[in-house]
């Protein structure tokens, strides 16, 4: 596993908004938090290429999970 900061996770999420190639991203155990989850949620609303996103074993709070759930409702790429 790669260790990265929530700030780096937020930057990765921002890049996903324009992604047209990456199909899977595993961010398990990378110290992501609610702020980075909010960024991933925003990206998922715009990204239809990504098929797999894993954020297991991170410190994401209820607000982050809610945002991710809302993003999943509109995302057409994730399986």
Image: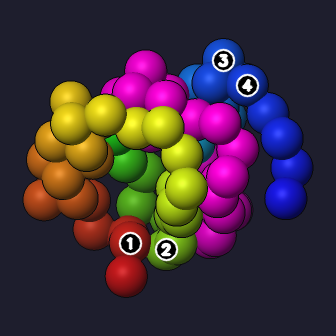
Q: Nearer the viewer, residue 74 or 40?
A: 40
SS for callout 3: helix
Q: Nearer the viewer, mark 1 or mark 4?
A: 4
Q: Quadrant of residue 45?
A: top left
Q: Are marks 1 and 4 in contact (CB under 8 Å)?
A: no
- Up the image or down, 61 lies above or below 58; here it is above
The CA span between labels 3 and 1 is: 23 Å
Q: Are marks 3 and 1 in contact (CB under 8 Å)?
A: no
Q: Earlier in the sequence, mark 4 or mark 2?
A: 4
Q: Nearer the viewer, residue 52 or 76?
A: 52
Q: Are marks 4 and 3 in contact (CB under 8 Å)?
A: yes
Residue found at x 48% / y 37% = 59
The CA span between labels 4 and 3 is: 5 Å
- Residue 8 placement (x, y as % from top left): 72, 25
Q: Is residue 19 left or right of residue 77?
A: right
SS for callout 2: loop
Q: Earlier in the sequence, mark 1 or mark 2?
A: 2
Can residue 3 be spotted in the picture? Answer: yes
Residue found at x 61% / y 48% = 19
The answer to whether residue 22 is magenta is yes
Q: Are marks 1 and 2 in contact (CB under 8 Å)?
A: yes
Q: Which residue is mark 3?
A: 7
Q: Are marks 4 and 2 in contact (CB under 8 Å)?
A: no
Q: Earlier in the sequence, mark 3 or mark 2?
A: 3
Q: Quadrant of residue 10?
A: top right
Q: In the image, which residues are magenta?
A: 18-40
Residue 51: which disc? 2
- Residue 44 placement (x, y as % from top left): 37, 48
Q: Which residue is mark 1?
A: 78
Residue 17: which disc? none
* Dot 1 alpha-carbon crowd within 10 angstroms: few under 14, some 14 to 19, many 20 or more: some
- Up the image or down, 17 lies above or below 28; here it is above
């Amino acid at each position: 596993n790669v260790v990265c900061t929530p700030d780096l996770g937020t930057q990765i999420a921002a890049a996903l908004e324009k992604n047209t190639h990456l199909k899977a991203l595993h961010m398990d155990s990378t110290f992501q938090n609610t702020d980075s989850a909010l960024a991933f949620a925003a990206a998922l609303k715009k990204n239809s290429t990504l098929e797999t996103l894993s954020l297991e074993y991170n410190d994401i709070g209820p607000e982050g999970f809610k945002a991710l759930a809302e993003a999943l409702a509109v995302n057409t790429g994730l399986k």
